[in-house]
Amino acid sequence: MTTIGLIGSGNIGGTVARLAVAAGHDVVLSNSRGPETLQELVGELGPKARAATPAEAAAAAGIVVVTVPLRAYRDVPVEALAGKVVIDTNNYYPERDGTFEELENGSTTTGELLQGHLPGSHVVKAFNNIWFEHLRSLARPAGAADRSALPIAGDDAGARKAVADLLDSIGYDTVDLGPLAENRRTQRDTPVYVVPYGAYGDKAGTPAAAKTILDLVNAA
């Protein structure tokens, strides 16, 4: 099993950590406020989880999930993530993050911003199009008839394969979109954003199979 590092341990990060531990992975959690603020979550997750600094979580992990507000992406440690597979969960919310002109004019994407900050890492966009409650509730074993799929995009094929394997282990099929620039098809307000997995506020969610997700991505 792969050790999963988390830089950011809020709704998405905490949910990924829970699913990963349930699947048998070790997790190393971090946030901007310090390891001591994560002791309750670590206690809940049990012996396969520990808290650390962002740099320590990055160094310890085979795959690192970066799930911080976009406005803070430049604070993500660079050297500790060199050579690592990095999952970017981010979306752009100007009301929260401030205005990014390169995102406003469409010249780049959120995933490409993080990749530019982490030139030695292999960034893969994932987990950004699903509400955390649906991420928790829709996980299913491999082969389940009602298994849902999540889209991913990244420039390195090996990194996409590693992320697809992780998703499979925690309960999801994958729709591989290819290059990282394709994450523009999964961003906020695209057809595949949140809605396919059920109504926001309905914690049970609605399964969304790979064909459904692919059709919606292609409609973007």
Image (tube, rainbow, N blue to C red):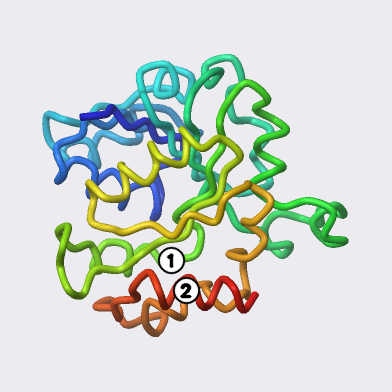
Q: How many numbered dots are placed on residues in this image?
A: 2
> Of the residues shown, which amino acid type is indicated by label 2?
Val
Horizontal side of 11 relative to 104 (left or right) equals: left
On the image, numbered disc 1 is attached to which residue?
130
44 up-or-down from 208: above or below: above
> Tag 2, which secondary structure?
loop
Q: Position of residue 185 (x, y in %)?
A: 63, 65
Q: Report x, y in % for residue 214.
A: 48, 71
Q: Residue at x 44, y 55 (%)?
A: 127
Q: Residues within 10 Å of mark 1 (few under 14, many from 20)?
A: many
Q: Is residue 196 rendered to the left or right of residue 192? A: left
Quadrant of the image for the C terminus?
bottom right
Q: Amino acid at mark 1?
A: Ile
Q: Give me the residue at 54% from left, 48% from top.
A: 125
Q: Which mark is residue 177?
A: none
Give the distance between the C-alpha atoms of the residues marked 1 and 2, in whole angstroms: 5 Å
Task: Compare residues 152 and 81 and report the one nearer the observer.
Answer: 152
- Indicate whether 206 appears above or below 68: below
Which of the numbered marks, if any, corresponds to residue 194?
Answer: 2
Q: Is residue 219 left or right of residue 27?
A: right
Labels 1 & 2 near each other (Cβ < 8 A) = yes
